[in-house]
Image (spheres, rainbow, N blue to C red):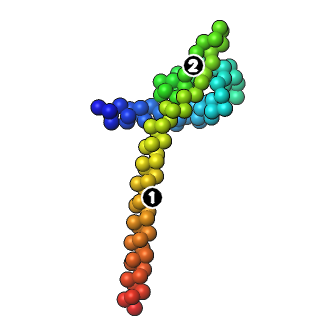
Amino acid sequence: MLVSHMANNLDHIFSALSDPTRRAIVARLGRGEAPVKTLAAPHDMALPSFLKHIDMLERAGLVHSRKEGRVRVCTLHPEALAAAETWLDQQRNLWAGRMDRLGRLAEQIAKDERNAK
Protein backbone atom coordinates (compact mmCIF):
# COMPACT_ATOMS: atom_id res chain seq x y z
CA MET A 1 0.00 0.00 0.00
CA LEU A 2 2.88 2.40 0.83
CA VAL A 3 4.53 1.72 -2.54
CA SER A 4 1.22 2.44 -4.31
CA HIS A 5 0.84 5.73 -2.41
CA MET A 6 4.43 6.72 -3.24
CA ALA A 7 3.91 5.87 -6.93
CA ASN A 8 0.66 7.85 -6.99
CA ASN A 9 2.43 10.81 -5.38
CA LEU A 10 5.23 10.57 -7.96
CA ASP A 11 2.62 10.51 -10.72
CA HIS A 12 1.08 13.73 -9.37
CA ILE A 13 4.47 15.43 -8.98
CA PHE A 14 5.75 14.52 -12.44
CA SER A 15 2.38 15.38 -13.99
CA ALA A 16 2.43 18.77 -12.28
CA LEU A 17 5.99 19.41 -13.46
CA SER A 18 5.26 18.31 -17.03
CA ASP A 19 3.96 21.75 -17.98
CA PRO A 20 6.36 24.67 -18.61
CA THR A 21 4.04 27.17 -16.91
CA ARG A 22 3.96 25.09 -13.74
CA ARG A 23 7.74 24.59 -13.84
CA ALA A 24 8.12 28.37 -14.15
CA ILE A 25 5.87 28.85 -11.13
CA VAL A 26 7.93 26.37 -9.09
CA ALA A 27 11.16 28.08 -10.20
CA ARG A 28 9.80 31.50 -9.24
CA LEU A 29 8.56 30.26 -5.86
CA GLY A 30 12.04 28.84 -5.26
CA ARG A 31 13.09 32.46 -4.73
CA GLY A 32 10.34 33.02 -2.14
CA GLU A 33 6.60 33.21 -1.71
CA ALA A 34 4.58 35.40 -4.05
CA PRO A 35 1.02 36.57 -4.67
CA VAL A 36 -0.86 34.83 -7.49
CA LYS A 37 -1.03 38.12 -9.40
CA THR A 38 2.78 38.35 -9.39
CA LEU A 39 3.13 34.71 -10.46
CA ALA A 40 0.60 35.17 -13.26
CA ALA A 41 2.09 38.38 -14.67
CA PRO A 42 4.72 36.78 -16.98
CA HIS A 43 2.18 34.34 -18.44
CA ASP A 44 -0.16 35.27 -21.27
CA MET A 45 -3.35 33.64 -19.99
CA ALA A 46 -6.56 34.50 -18.19
CA LEU A 47 -6.44 34.34 -14.40
CA PRO A 48 -8.92 31.41 -14.17
CA SER A 49 -6.66 29.38 -16.48
CA PHE A 50 -3.60 30.33 -14.44
CA LEU A 51 -5.35 29.32 -11.22
CA LYS A 52 -5.82 25.82 -12.65
CA HIS A 53 -2.03 25.55 -12.78
CA ILE A 54 -1.78 26.66 -9.15
CA ASP A 55 -4.46 24.13 -8.16
CA MET A 56 -2.60 21.30 -9.87
CA LEU A 57 0.63 22.24 -8.08
CA GLU A 58 -1.30 22.29 -4.80
CA ARG A 59 -2.82 18.84 -5.46
CA ALA A 60 0.69 17.52 -6.08
CA GLY A 61 1.78 18.99 -2.74
CA LEU A 62 4.38 21.25 -4.34
CA VAL A 63 2.68 24.56 -3.55
CA HIS A 64 0.51 25.86 -0.73
CA SER A 65 -1.61 28.99 -1.00
CA ARG A 66 -3.25 31.10 1.66
CA LYS A 67 -5.46 34.16 1.68
CA GLU A 68 -4.10 37.39 3.12
CA GLY A 69 -7.01 39.77 2.90
CA ARG A 70 -7.94 39.86 -0.79
CA VAL A 71 -4.59 38.46 -1.92
CA ARG A 72 -3.81 34.77 -2.46
CA VAL A 73 -0.15 34.11 -1.61
CA CYS A 74 1.67 30.96 -2.76
CA THR A 75 4.57 29.19 -1.07
CA LEU A 76 6.73 26.39 -2.43
CA HIS A 77 6.97 23.13 -0.49
CA PRO A 78 10.32 21.82 -1.78
CA GLU A 79 10.17 18.81 0.54
CA ALA A 80 7.41 17.47 -1.71
CA LEU A 81 10.07 17.03 -4.37
CA ALA A 82 11.92 14.55 -2.13
CA ALA A 83 10.02 11.55 -3.52
CA ALA A 84 10.86 12.56 -7.09
CA GLU A 85 14.47 13.24 -6.15
CA THR A 86 14.75 9.83 -4.49
CA TRP A 87 13.30 8.11 -7.55
CA LEU A 88 15.62 10.01 -9.90
CA ASP A 89 18.64 9.15 -7.72
CA GLN A 90 17.67 5.46 -7.82
CA GLN A 91 17.40 5.59 -11.61
CA ARG A 92 20.73 7.42 -11.91
CA ASN A 93 22.45 4.83 -9.72
CA LEU A 94 20.86 1.96 -11.62
CA TRP A 95 21.99 3.29 -14.99
CA ALA A 96 25.45 4.25 -13.71
CA GLY A 97 25.91 0.65 -12.55
CA ARG A 98 24.74 -0.68 -15.90
CA MET A 99 27.09 1.64 -17.79
CA ASP A 100 30.02 0.61 -15.55
CA ARG A 101 29.30 -3.08 -16.25
CA LEU A 102 28.99 -2.39 -19.97
CA GLY A 103 32.32 -0.53 -19.93
CA ARG A 104 34.04 -3.41 -18.15
CA LEU A 105 32.56 -5.88 -20.66
CA ALA A 106 33.76 -3.77 -23.60
CA GLU A 107 37.24 -3.59 -22.09
CA GLN A 108 37.28 -7.36 -21.56
CA ILE A 109 36.17 -8.02 -25.16
CA ALA A 110 38.87 -5.67 -26.50
CA LYS A 111 41.47 -7.37 -24.30
CA ASP A 112 40.33 -10.84 -25.46
CA GLU A 113 40.51 -9.72 -29.12
CA ARG A 114 44.06 -8.38 -28.65
CA ASN A 115 45.13 -11.61 -26.97
CA ALA A 116 43.57 -13.73 -29.74
CA LYS A 117 45.80 -12.12 -32.41
Label 2, label 1: how many angstroms apart (C-alpha)?
39 Å
Image spot of residue 33 (x, y percent): 64, 24
Q: Secondary structure at mark 1?
A: helix
Q: Is residue 108 above or below residue 115?
A: above
Nearer to us in this view, 50 or 84: 84
The mark nearer the N terminus, 2 or 1, is 2
The three-letter code of the residue at mark 2 reads Ser
Q: Is residue 65 above or below residue 10?
A: above
Image spot of residue 60 (x, y percent): 47, 28
Q: Which residue is mark 2?
A: 65
The three-letter code of the residue at mark 1 reads Ala
Q: Secondary structure at mark 2?
A: strand
Image spot of residue 111 (x, y percent): 41, 82
Label 2 with label 1: CB-CB less than 8 Å = no
Q: Quadrant of residue 68?
A: top right
Q: Which residue is mark 1?
A: 96
